[in-house]
């Protein structure tokens, strides 16, 4: 069993072809969402001057990417894009996971407390995006959005502008513009506040959308409208970065943005609206099946490795916590202290969300201790220790479920605690906790989706990337949902088969043993 499991895990690592982290001396690591066209987006090849995305076989392009190339050239380095969720950009920079943020970020006063900013490399114009057939399609002023349900992206100045829409209903901020487009399409919101380039992209991608510009529009501060490069405080390269940006005139900025608008991956197929839902799903699978396979493989790798490692952690803790007290006072004191440590570990990891643990472990260790962990390894560690906390309690319950008489009988035979556990108790415990272990495996498959916050390219992250490329959110995420279901359903059936194999004639409960004795 151990050899088979090792072979499977090794095969997964080889098939996935996990890339090594690029050396900081050779590359300038640029953080961005790669999902905010025309500023930045994800594509399949290096056409039109796209740049490789770290840890994947995909590329990023857009206005931000072209600016990044100019800055990297000035610094004598090669650009490398690190695809990161918006909320993870500043933690990634502060912890040293990336060198710069070039992601359409405004140098607001709040952000300046955390990081430094270069000079501006673009000036944005806030606009509204609505449905063409909606109630607010003919709006011309801010006052026309009375009673409208309006939102924008979490953590950006655009969301604060909603307060200038008198009488509007401020909807909770969303994670990215892909979510907002889906919400607008489905009628969850009536409009969202955006920037002109993004709104033009959305309008081109979906004929049902309409961009609203105002003659006397939002009142925006200069620091909010400007877009700059985020850097760590004290970074000595900021003067060179500003020198590179100074070579790009306003006229060149406009020309570059217009060029990126024409090159962005916008679907202009007029037959798209005539496609049935099934046809859309089939076409997406044809175009993006390699991406889905890689994302599924990464999800399986992390969840399988994390579950096995978590089970081992749980078994070790379970055995330790049921061990008899040492007779030596010093050893007994150490045993008690270590028991308290284990209790703290279990309570913390059972009492906090995995997404928070991911941020703390991946970014926190780098920022606090200078330890840089590969994101895939970090993901496996996070899932393993999280699962271990739950499995330790499951194992403890499984040990206590074993009849106390078996412990007494083993002691009478002269067995040590370790021998009793290894030869008598644990074989029964493993069988008894198998359903709970399977349940943890299924949970881990689904919970890997939160690891996108540290840029792990698992199934959900892959699906979101595909959706930002084809702008077909509902069919794309339907495919993702089906894949998750197939994974969990298959794993459940395999584990039940193993349970039936273990429930053979050689496996008997205490009651059955008594019946056999009576027959004899």
Image (cartoon, helix red, strand yellow):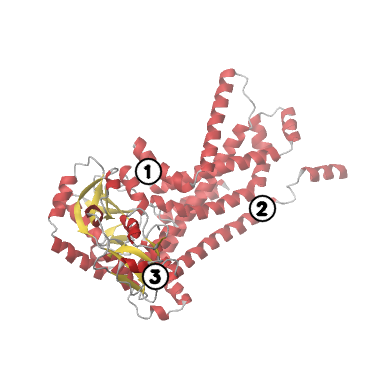
Q: CA distance from mark 2 to mark 1?
A: 40 Å
Q: Residues within 10 Å of mark 2 (few under 14, many from 20)?
A: some
Front-lying residue, 354 or 97: 354
Residue picked out by circle 3:
287
Front-lying residue, 38 or 164: 164
Q: Residue furthest right?
A: 519
Q: CA distance from mark 1 to mark 3?
A: 34 Å
Q: Position of residue 47 (x, y in %)?
A: 26, 66
Res 406 quadrant in image: top right
Looking at the image, is mark 2 or mark 3 nearer the viewer?
A: 3
Q: Position of residue 157 (x, y in %)?
A: 31, 55
* Vertical placement of residue 442 versus 165, above or below: above
Label tally = 3
- 191 horizontally vs 118: left or right: right
Marks 2 and 3: CB-CB under 8 Å? no
Can residue 386 be seen here? The reply is: yes
Front-lying residue, 188 or 366: 188
Residue at image x 40%, y 55%? 457
Looking at the image, is mark 2 or mark 1 nearer the viewer?
A: 1
Residue picked out by circle 1:
363
Res 15 quadrant in image: bottom left
Q: Residues within 10 Å of mark 3 (few under 14, many from 20)?
A: few
Residue at image x 33%, y 64%? 44
Residue picked out by circle 2:
499
Looking at the image, is mark 1 or mark 3 nearer the viewer?
A: 1
Among numbered discs 2 and 1, the one appearing first in the sequence: 1
Q: Secondary structure at mark 1?
A: helix
Marks 1 and 3: CB-CB under 8 Å? no
Residue at image x 52%, y 54%? 445
Q: Position of residue 126 (x, y in %)?
A: 28, 62
- 330 horizontally vs 183: left or right: right
């Amino acid at each position: 069993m151990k050899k088979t499991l090792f072979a499977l895990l090794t095969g997964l690592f080889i098939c996935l072809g996990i890339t090594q982290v690029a050396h900081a001396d050779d590359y300038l690591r640029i953080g961005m969402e790669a999902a905010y066209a025309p500023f930045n987006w994800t594509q399949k090849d290096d056409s039109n001057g796209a740049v490789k995305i770290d840890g994947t076989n995909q590329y990023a392009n857009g206005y931000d990417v072209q600016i990044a190339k100019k800055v990297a050239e000035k610094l004598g380095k090669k650009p490398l894009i690190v695809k990161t969720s918006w909320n993870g950009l500043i933690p990634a920079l502060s912890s040293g996971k990336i060198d710069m943020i070039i992601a359409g970020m405004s140098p607001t006063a709040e952000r300046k407390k955390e990081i430094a900013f270069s000079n501006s490399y673009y000036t944005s114009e806030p606009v509204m995006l609505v449905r063409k057939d909606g109630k607010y399609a003919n709006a011309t002023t801010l006052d026309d959005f009375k009673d409208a349900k309006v939102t924008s992206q979490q953590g950006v100045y655009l969301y604060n502008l909603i307060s200038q829409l008198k009488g509007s209903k401020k909807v909770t901020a969303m994670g990215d513009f892909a979510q907002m487009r889906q919400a607008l399409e489905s009628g969850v919101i009536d409009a969202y506040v955006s920037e002109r380039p993004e709104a033009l992209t959305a309008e081109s991608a979906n004929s049902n959308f309409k961009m609203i510009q105002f003659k006397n529009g939002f009142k925006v501060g200069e620091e909010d409208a400007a877009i700059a490069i985020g850097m760590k405080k004290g970074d000595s390269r900021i003067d060179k970065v500003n020198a590179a940006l100074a070579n790009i005139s306003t006229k060149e900025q406009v020309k570059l943005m217009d060029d990126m608008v024409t090159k962005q991956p916008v679907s202009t197929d007029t037959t798209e609206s005539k496609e049935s839902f099934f046809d859309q799903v089939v076409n997406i699978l044809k175009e993006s099946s390699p991406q889905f396979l890689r994302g599924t493989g990464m999800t399986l790798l992390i969840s399988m490795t994390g579950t096995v490692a978590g089970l081992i952690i749980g078994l070790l803790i379970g055995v330790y916590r049921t061990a008899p007290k040492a007779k030596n006072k010093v050893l007994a004191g150490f045993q008690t202290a270590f028991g308290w440590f284990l209790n703290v570990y279990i309570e913390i990891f059972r009492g906090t969300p995995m997404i928070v643990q991911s941020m703390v472990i991946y970014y926190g260790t780098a920022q606090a201790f200078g330890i840089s962990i590969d994101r895939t390894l970090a993901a496996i560690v996070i899932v393993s220790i999280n699962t271990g906390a739950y499995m330790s309690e499951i194992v403890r319950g499984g040990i206590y479920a074993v009849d106390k008489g078996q412990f007494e009988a083993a002691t009478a035979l002269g067995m040590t605690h370790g021998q009793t556990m290894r030869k008598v108790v644990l074989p029964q415990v493993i069988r008894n906790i198998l359903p709970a272990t399977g349940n943890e495996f299924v949970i881990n498959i689904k919970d890997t989706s939160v690891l996108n916050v540290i840029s792990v390219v698992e199934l959900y992250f892959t699906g979101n990337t595909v959706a930002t490329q084809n702008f077909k959110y509902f069919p794309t995420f339907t495919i993702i949902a089906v894949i998750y279901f197939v994974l969990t359903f298959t794993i459940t059936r395999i584990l039940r088969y193993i349970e039936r194999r273990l429930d053979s004639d050689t496996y008997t409960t205490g009651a059955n043993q008594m019946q056999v004795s009576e027959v004899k």
